[in-house]
């Protein structure tokens, strides 16, 4: 019985460690997104005009301009979901 309890406790600690690691990785990944949100203007018009101008003078192709514009749009409006798991 004690062995089964020890095994279960070990598995629970391992699971908690994986959850902690996943949280740390998610935080590290979101740091550049947070910085970009603070640096980029709230009004997206200058960004969209700049991307359009680059495409107009053929410095970038139009699919790249569209992808950049959509990326900016998503970056400014996306909010990370709160974790549903209770924290300990």
Image (cartoon, rainbow, N blue to C red):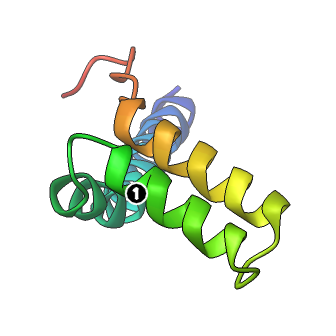
- The image shows residue 37, relative to residue 85, as above or below, that is below
Which residue sits at x=29%, y=62%? 36
Task: Give the camera-side residue of 45 and 10.
Answer: 45
Residue 46 screen position, x and y as percent: 33, 55
Residue ID for mark 1? 47
- State the SS at label 1: helix
Report the side of 72 relative to 41 (left or right). right
**Where's residue 53, x and y in %?**
57, 68
Determine the residue located farthest toward the front in the rendered image: 57
Q: Residue at x 33, y 22 (%)?
A: 82
Q: Is 73 placed above or below 61 here?
A: above
Front one among 47 and 17:
47
| Residue displayed at 20% across by 42% down | 42
Q: Position of residue 32 (x, y in %)?
A: 33, 67
**In the visual, does 41 lie left or right of 65?**
left
Query: Which quadrant of the rendered structure holds the C terminus?
Result: top left
Q: Locate residue 60: give its quadrant.
A: bottom right
The residue carrying pointer 1 sits among few (fewer than 14), some (14 to 19) or many (20 or more) residues within 10 Å by Cα, namely some
């Amino acid at each position: 019985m004690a062995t089964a309890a020890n095994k279960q406790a070990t598995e629970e600690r391992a699971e908690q460690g994986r959850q902690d690691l996943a949280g740390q990785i998610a935080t590290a990944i979101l740091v550049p997104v947070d910085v970009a949100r603070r640096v980029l203007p709230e009004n997206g018009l200058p960004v969209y005009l700049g991307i359009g101008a680059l495409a107009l003078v053929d410095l970038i192709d139009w699919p790249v301009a569209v992808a950049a514009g959509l990326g900016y749009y998503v970056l400014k409006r996306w909010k990370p979901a709160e974790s549903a798991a209770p924290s300990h």
